[in-house]
């Protein structure tokens, strides 16, 4: 059934009729399966992949490596959850290696992101250090190339 | 007599007498138009996987710009022998049974020229790839086209063979998975054909360029049938499954005597395949399973879509089990395949290839390639539906 999810990951706007055709299965079955995925939380949301650079006022993405002290109960989960709930925080991952949490922050300006790091994040109990990077350019996101792909140079008819 | 006429008379009769490919005529018409959605393209829409391109770049950086052994790089021949062994269970010696060619096209030319004497008959099945018939004629052989039938799902049957074989038959040329019909053979079909070839002492040339691209069941090679390795030239290449058409890389696997015979022609005409393409192919054999799987999954989804769409429109089309073509039956519209294709192009800007480009028995069919993005296929299907509504 992963095939259905793969198709939706490529294009969430695909109609159930088209999905059914591609998967060679009844359309009702496709609809039921999607509803089930949504109910069970396998599908969390449907979003557009936006090329921010094409917009006049694009968002600034900040990537922050955070070291934290795990708690005796709950480990990293509690603090990660607290951080996740801030609306400016886009993504949070627990990492192996030289730091613990990797954060992606979206803001309108660098100042806004800096404000979040200096005032909110660094002062949070359990956070021992932060290392902040600003994202310069997106080449590929969610498997999608952000610049135009190769042109189709093939002959229009060939044997 | 003007100059061009006298030049024309100097061209060898055998070349003069062979008509231009129907595909080329159609290509000229399509090329003169803008914004055509083309379902007429016989090559993958994917670009060669990145790591394979990198391998070629690195080979260039290392200064690999020389000739190679006539047979091809030994590392590549070893890779090929291993690949074929894994696919078919048949072992070939990379030193004297594997030959690297410039595409399967060259391999076929070598095979036909190595075997055919003037007047020898070559059995092949139609609808077929466009070059089989001319290649046989260029070698002064006699092409005997066996018409496969829609009722049989375009599979070649023993009965078809029996109806066409003669005392002069020397070679049987097979191409499954098939271009243009998308047909594949079952193991039983292959065993029947093999038994026939052995009874009639035929040499078999098997063009298995699409062997990776089957969607419902595995392809079964005729070389896997006991007794066939000894009388078969197996032809394959990197163009389709690895999306490497422009690299021009093919290979043959055959017993030493046959390989040596093909090698004689190859060394005096081609010398060797380009070294950068060979280096890229070494990488292709090592690390491309994931890429092939990804492309295959994409083709399967499109196959289902295009086949489902034709069914909805009431255009009969056998379910293509291999390659990347749907061969749709448009005979009920009372037009020839060429008329249908031209009118469709004219009215809806969709290009597909008339079945007659692949032999006379392709009349009443159009070949629609699904080596095109799903978005384009969707739009093409909408346009075809609109087109037939008005007929």
Image (cartoon, coloured by chain):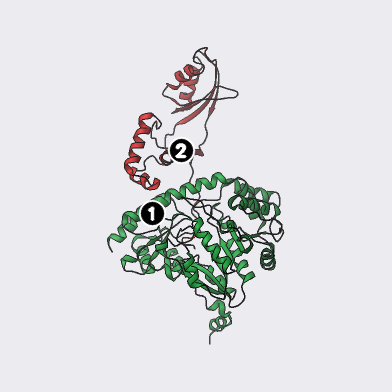
Q: Pointer 1 indicates a residue of which chain?
A: B
Q: Is residue B190 visible?
A: yes
* Mark pair 1, 2: CA separation: 39 Å
Check the picture and name the quadrant holding the N terminus of chain A. top left
In the displayed orientation, state which residue is furthest to the left: B390
Q: Is residue B309 above or below residue A9?
A: below
Of residues A54 and A140, which is closer to you in this image?
A: A140
Residue at position x 37%, y 48% in the image = A21
Q: Is residue B24 visible?
A: no
Task: Residue A87 in the image: state x and y as whole percent.
Answer: 41, 24
Residue at position x 28%, y 60% in the image = B389
Circle 2 is placed at which residue position? A53
Task: Residue B22 in the image: state x and y as whole percent.
Answer: 46, 69
Residue at position x 61%, y 73% in the image = B116
Of residues B271 and B129, which is closer to you in this image?
A: B129
What shade has chain A been given?
red
Q: Identify the element where label 1 is drawn.
A: helix
Of residues B60 and B69, which is closer to you in this image?
A: B69
Task: Residue B96 in the image: state x and y as whole percent.
Answer: 70, 59
Q: Residues within 10 Å of mark 2 (few under 14, many from 20)?
A: few
- Is B363 on the left-hand or right-hand side of B116? left
Circle 1 is placed at which residue position? B307
Task: Residue B391 in the image: state x and y as whole percent.
Answer: 28, 64
């Amino acid at each position: 059934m992963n095939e259905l999810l793969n198709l939706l990951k490529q294009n969430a706007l695909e109609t159930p009729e088209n999905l059914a055709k591609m998967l060679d299965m009844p359309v009702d079955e496709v609809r039921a399966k999607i509803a089930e995925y949504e109910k069970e939380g396998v599908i969390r949301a449907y979003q557009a992949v936006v090329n921010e650079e094409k917009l006049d006022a694009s968002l600034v993405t900040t990537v922050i490596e955070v070291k934290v002290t795990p708690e005796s109960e709950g480990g990293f989960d509690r603090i990660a959850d607290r951080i996740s709930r801030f609306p400016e925080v886009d993504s949070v991952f627990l990492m192996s290696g030289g730091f613990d949490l990797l954060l992606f922050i979206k803001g309108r300006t660098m100042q806004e992101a800096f404000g979040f790091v200096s005032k909110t994040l660094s002062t949070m109990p359990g956070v021992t250090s932060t290392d902040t990077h600003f994202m310069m350019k997106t080449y590929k996101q969610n498997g999608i190339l952000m610049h135009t792909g190769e042109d189709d140079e093939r002959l229009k008819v060939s044997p | 007599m003007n100059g061009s006429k006298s030049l024309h008379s100097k061209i060898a009769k055998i070349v003069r007498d062979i008509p231009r490919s129907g595909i080329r005529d159609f290509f000229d018409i399509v090329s003169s138009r803008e914004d055509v959605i083309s379902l007429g393209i016989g090559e993958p829409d994917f670009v060669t996987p990145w790591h394979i391109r990198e391998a070629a770049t690195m080979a260039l950086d290392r200064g690999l710009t020389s000739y190679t052994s006539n047979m091809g790089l030994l590392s590549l021949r070893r890779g090929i022998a291993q690949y074929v062994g894994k696919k078919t269970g048949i072992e070939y010696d990379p030193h004297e049974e594997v030959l690297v060619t410039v595409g399967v096209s060259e391999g076929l030319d070598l095979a036909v020229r190595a075997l055919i004497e003037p007047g020898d008959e070559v059995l092949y099945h139609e609808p077929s790839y466009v070059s089989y018939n001319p290649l046989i004629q260029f070698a002064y052989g006699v092409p005997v086209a066996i018409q496969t039938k829609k009722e049989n799902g375009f599979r070649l049957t023993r009965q078809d063979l029996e109806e066409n074989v003669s005392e002069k038959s020397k070679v049987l040329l097979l191409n499954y998975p098939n271009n243009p019909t998308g047909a594949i053979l079952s193991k039983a079909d292959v065993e029947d054909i093999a038994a026939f070839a052995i009874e009639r002492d035929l040499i078999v040339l098997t063009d298995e360029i699409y062997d990776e691209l089957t969607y419902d069941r595995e392809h079964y090679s005729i070389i896997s049938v006991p007794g066939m390795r000894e009388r078969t030239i197996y032809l394959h290449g990197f163009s389709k499954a690895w999306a490497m058409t422009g690299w021009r890389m093919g290979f043959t696997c055959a017993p030493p005597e046959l390989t040596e015979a093909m090698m004689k022609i190859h060394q005096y005409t081609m010398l060797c395949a380009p070294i950068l393409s060979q280096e890229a192919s070494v990488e292709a054999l090592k690390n491309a399973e994931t890429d092939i799987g990804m492309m295959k999954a994409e083709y399967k989804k499109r196959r289902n879509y295009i086949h489902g769409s034709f069914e909805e429109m009431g255009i009969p089309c056998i379910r293509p089990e291999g390659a990347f073509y749907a061969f749709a039956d448009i005979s009920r519209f009372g037009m020839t395949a060429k008329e249908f294709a031209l009118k469709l192009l004219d009215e809806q800007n969709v290009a597909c290839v008339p079945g007659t480009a692949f032999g006379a028995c392709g009349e009443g069919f159009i070949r629609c390639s699904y080596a095109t993005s799903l978005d384009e296929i969707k739009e093409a299907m909408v346009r075809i539906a609109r087109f037939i509504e008005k007929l």
